[in-house]
């Protein structure tokens, strides 16, 4: 077994900023593993696990899931990685989580090499999130105007049901964006001080943003 430390790329930004989309591209092109705390919660809902049952009320309401649930889950995901490099998406979301991640990086032996912040204006986030749909079975993400499934309500990839996440409803989105502003913006300042933060304009097309992300990753 290799004793080298793993490399972690943090993809960071408000809900709807395209973290998941960009992570998918990096997984395809650069053989990163992808850990998304939101995806792990949704996987637990699908599998109807005890963790999923505990987390669901927070996620559906657009609240942050308590650290007592989230941290253990994240630790397991990182500890079980086979790849040497991974993208972390959706964590940290609070200053406290950023500090806990530092401790975890020592315990599990990884370095946070880069932090990419995708900056997107609120009105664009709102449009992306209200139009977003997702496959219940495989998690493929669609958008009602820019990338609808060929057959309404059916996933192009696996034939699963395409649905709207409960937390992508208008009221919950407003709450999530507010939570983001209050809890997550200090995380941006944290990494600004650490000195490994790169701010990217995330308002363009997925392809144009991918190009910029790849430039940063390849540097
Ligand atoms: P996302 O898919 O990243 O938008 O996350 C969906 C939801 O999962 C969030 O609105 C939170 O309820 C929950 N969640 C994801 N990541 C975290 C985290 N780091 N801390 C607490 N809750 C989280």
Image (spheres, rainbow, N blue to C red):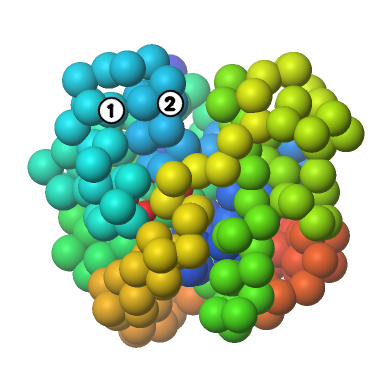
Number of residues whose C-alpha sits closer than 10 Å to that of mark 1, classed few (under 14), some (14–19) or many (20 or more): some
Q: Quadrant of residue 85?
A: top right
In the image, residue 122 above or below residue 151: below
Displayed quadrant of residue 156 = top right
Q: Is residue 195 above or below residue 62?
A: below
Is 60 left or right of 69, judged from the image as shown? right
Residue furthest right in the image: 150
Q: Quadrant of the C terminus?
A: bottom right
Judge by depth and name the residue closer to the eye, 194 or 92.
92
- Tell me the residue at 67%/19% (across/down): 160
Q: Secondary structure at mark 2?
A: helix
**Crowd rating for badge 2 (residues with CA inside 10 Å; few <14, some 14–19, many 20+):** some
Point out the tag, 2 or 1, that comes first from the N-terminus. Answer: 2
The x, y position of residue 78, in whole percent, is 36, 34
Mark 1 and ligand 1: say if the CB distance to the nearest ligand atom is below 8 Å.
Answer: no
- Residue 52 tag number: 1
The structure residue drawn at horizontal position 24% and vertical position 47%, both measured from the top left corner, is: 58
| Left or right: residue 168 compared with residue 55 | right
């Amino acid at each position: 077994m290799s004793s080298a430390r793993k490399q972690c790329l943090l993809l960071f930004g408000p809900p709807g900023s395209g973290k998941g989309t960009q992570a998918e591209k990096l997984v395809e092109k650069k053989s990163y593993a992808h850990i998304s705390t939101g995806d792990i919660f949704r996987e637990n809902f699908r599998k109807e696990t005890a963790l999923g049952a505990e987390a669901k009320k927070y996620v559906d309401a657009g609240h942050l899931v308590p650290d007592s649930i989230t941290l253990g889950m994240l630790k397991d995901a990182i500890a079980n990685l086979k790849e040497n490099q991974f993208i972390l998406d959706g964590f940290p979301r609070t200053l406290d989580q950023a500090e806990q991640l530092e401790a975890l990086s020592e315990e599990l032996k990884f370095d946070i090499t880069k932090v990419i912040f995708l900056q997107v204006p609120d009105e664009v986030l709102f449009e992306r999130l209200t139009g977003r749909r997702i496959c219940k079975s495989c998690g493929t993400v669609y958008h009602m105007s820019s990338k609808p499934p060929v057959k309404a309500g059916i996933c192009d990839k696996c034939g699963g049901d395409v649905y709207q996440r409960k937390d992508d409803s208008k009221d919950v989105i407003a709450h999530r964006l507010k939570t983001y502003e209050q809890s997550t913006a200090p995380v941006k300042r944290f990494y600004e001080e650490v000195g490994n933060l790169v701010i990217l304009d995330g308002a363009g097309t997925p392809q144009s943003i991918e190009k910029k992300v790849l430039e940063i990753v390849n540097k």
